[in-house]
Image: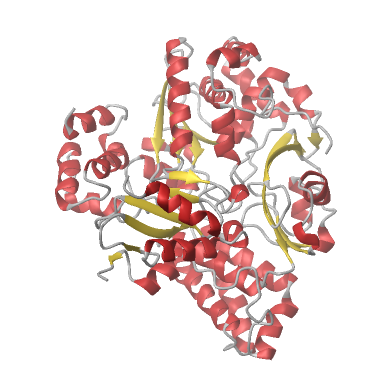
Amino acid sequence: MAEYPQFVFAGTDGGAVTRIEDYEAVGGFAPLRKARAMAPDDVIAELEASGLRGRGGAFFPTGRKWAFVPKPDQLPKPHYLVVNADESEPGTFKDREIMLRVPFRFLEGCLIAAHAISSQHVFVYIRGEYEQEFEVLRDSLEAMRKADLLGGVTVVLHRGAGAYICGEETALLESLEGKRGQPRTKPPFPAIAGLYAAPTAVNNVESITTVTSVLELGAAEYAKLGVESSTGTRVFSLSGDVVSPGNYELPHGITLRELIYDVGGGVPGGRELKAIIPGGSSTSVLTEAEIDTPLDFTSLAQAGSSIGSAGVIIIDDRCCMVQLGIRVSQFYEHESCGKCTPCRVGTRWLTQILQKIEGGRASQPDLDLLLSVCDRILGKCLCPLGDSDAIAVLSYVDRFRDEYQAHIDLGRCPFDGESSLEGVLAPSAMHERHGNHRVVSA
Amino acid sequence: MSGDSQIQKLRKQYPESTSAVLPALRLAQEEHGGWLPPEALREVADALELTPAYCVSIASFYDQFRLEPMGRRVVEVCTNVSCALAGAQQVVEAFERELGVDAGSTSVDGAFSLGTVECLGGCGWATVVAIDNRHRLRVQAADVPGIVEEHRGG
């Protein structure tokens, strides 16, 4: 495997840098000093010049997002930086590794971002399941406080409690305000009226960590790597049917083929590559025929998919694509907050139609109905959760129509019980079958 | 420190006190043996000037809060796509056999609760099993008897 330049994981030598003196020894906190010597607008200009775009999934330019936050004299309210560390998109596990291996680079990025938007208050919303990551951040933050690096900024580590929807920025803000995590109507956007209705920037962990790298390298140097629409590196999470799963920091524009075969060692057991989910389970599936697609924003959009959160799931030829549809749809059904009817009802309906197809009980109109329900979810909700289910399911039918048709024509699953997802039950289905956390008496 | 004074400390971190409801419920759950009985909800409500009903509306929304008693150890297996491709269902069934309980239930001696969960964010290290929120990575069905043995009696 070729060596690729490391920005997010620079100086780690494959391990973790969790002692403050070790981080300083690899140049830590110089970017922060550099940023604090600059006017906030100049830091924003530097980020805009770097081309850095959000790594959480929406790919919004980071500098532009900060530029939308009013200046303190324009809107004299407290300004907040909220970091989205609620990583929950299936297939994505990069942010936790960033927090574990380069906690200081991440926290340094928080302070640089706070300076850029003139904020004295940082909240890191970290998913509740990330216990070890929380502890590492807590200890790292304490070390920075002792080293007098916070510069009057308060950084609060706020733990979530298990809700995928809180990765959506307005649901996250609701949750941080102590409410149920249900998305807000936009506008107003968080930059104007975010946390406690005050100006707020919400950024992802990897984006914030990369901010430190941009300040360290300079925008021009950073932008040299990657491709025009997608500068710099990306931490790809590789999982599924692949020899060497894991997180890999690689330049944008590397192809799926390079990622799967050169970096990931290919599909195990000499089996055939069947499908690739390129950017977390919300993104459209690609087939083996599309593996020369470069992994960048524009190329994946042209291929009809999205780079999303760069969580790449590899699926080999043992997997039934109807079963995949069921499992993915069950996830969105479970995680729907219930606020918008098309999502609340539609995700459940999609699961039921897919189960009918898988069970061999479906006729031709059911497939049409499946597509029609997708259409009635798309673009009709406050947030993209319902859309995610519809986009995924539509893409499975689009790319593997013959397989869906075969279920209907044969009146059974053509995998005959041999699919790699055979018998997999989602938590909702399993707990329904067994009763909800009952105590067994015998 | 009493529960209330700890909650007051949490509350001071936030410009508005309602923001402390998630950390306060987490704390109350830890202090009440892993679930939120009515008195725990009352404590949090009183400390933050909320109502117990409000606290239930929050607790019922988030998967990590429990409104019924749990076993002393809580075992949760991720069955989302990447873990499922690596054999998560077989891991669940191995735990069911080893613990003598179905997923979604607690053993009669109160030692273990077994559950399945959505993506735990460890897709590259499948199958991920959380035991009391600590993640075990790359778990296979064959590892399950040893894992259960390790946690029995503790």
Residue A247 shown left or right of residue A262 in the figure: left
Residue situated in front as seen by the camera: A253 or A44: A253
Q: Residue at x 59, y 80 (%)?
A: A358
The answer to which of B67 and A215 lies nearer the viewer is B67
Residue drawn at point x = 46 percent, y = 35 percent: A132
Colouring method of the image: secondary structure
| Quadrant of the rendering where the N terminus of chain A is positioned | top right
Locate residue A59 relative to residue A250 in the image: left or right: left
Q: What residue appears at the point 58 percent right and 36 percent down from the top-left corner?
A: A97
Indicate the position of residue B118 as horizontal and vertical percent values: 48, 57
Above or below, A21 against B98 in this view is above
Q: Give above or below for A150 relative to A268.
A: above
Asked if one can make out residue A65 in the rendered structure from this viewpoint, the answer is no
Instruction: Report which quarter residue A287 is drawn in.
Output: bottom right
Question: In the rendering, at what x and y percent does residue A379 appear?
Answer: 57, 62
In x, y percent, where is residue A315? 70, 61
**Residue B16 appears in the figure:** yes
